[in-house]
Amino acid sequence: MTTAEFLERFAQVAGSRMKLPTALIGAWDQFVESCEAGYGDILDEFTFDRSVRDRIAVALQDEGLREFEQMRWVEEQIRAIDGRYRKLLLDQTVFEGRPWWKATFPRYAGPQMAAELLATYGLTVAVREPPSAWP
């Protein structure tokens, strides 16, 4: 099976504007980095940004993709990023029956999201000021 066949199948399965595995992996990595720093946006944006992991789950579970050797590399990358994200998560499950990445929230957040988590779910998280894009 060729790389071109793998990429074609991945694009079909991913079904998003990020049709390359590297784009999906990069988006998940950037999201996790933002959570490590203290997610600096609102809760609705967090939910939207986190949804990239849903597309990854679909790709990881696809039997056709699993036949490609290239998926071993994708799985390895995702495992590493998932490990970083799992370490950030609260021990408290907020949503039973959801995938692990959607069952709770990171223990750090920017001030706005921390306030929303407290008001909406009664969750207290450590506030981290995300790094500013401006010097």
Image (cartoon, rainbow, N blue to C red):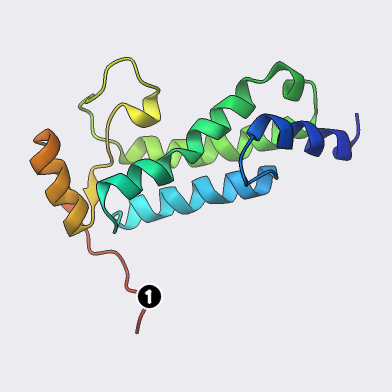
Q: Is residue 6 left or right of residue 49?
A: right
- The residue located at (42%, 54%) in the rendering is 33
Q: Badge 1 is on which residue?
A: 133
Give residue 110's position: percent from left, percent from top.
Answer: 23, 57
- Is 49 or 22 nearer to us in this picture? 49
Helix, strand, or loop for circle 1? loop
Compared to residue 7, the image places residue 33 above or below, namely below
- The residue located at (24%, 51%) in the rendering is 109
Compared to residue 24, the image places residue 127 above or below, namely below
- The residue located at (87%, 40%) in the rendering is 4
Amino acid at dot 1: Ala
Compared to residue 65, the image places residue 7 above or below, namely below
Q: Is residue 23 left or right of residue 70?
A: left
Give residue 77's position: percent from left, percent from top.
Answer: 60, 40
Q: Is residue 70 left or right of residue 113?
A: right
Which quadrant does the N terminus fall into? Answer: top right
| Residue 65: quadrant of the picture | top right
| Residue neighbourhood size for the residue with mark 1, other residues' Cα within 10 Å, grouped as few (<14), some (14–19), many (≥20) | few
Compared to residue 36, the image places residue 95 above or below, namely above
- Is 120 or 103 nearer to us in this picture? 120
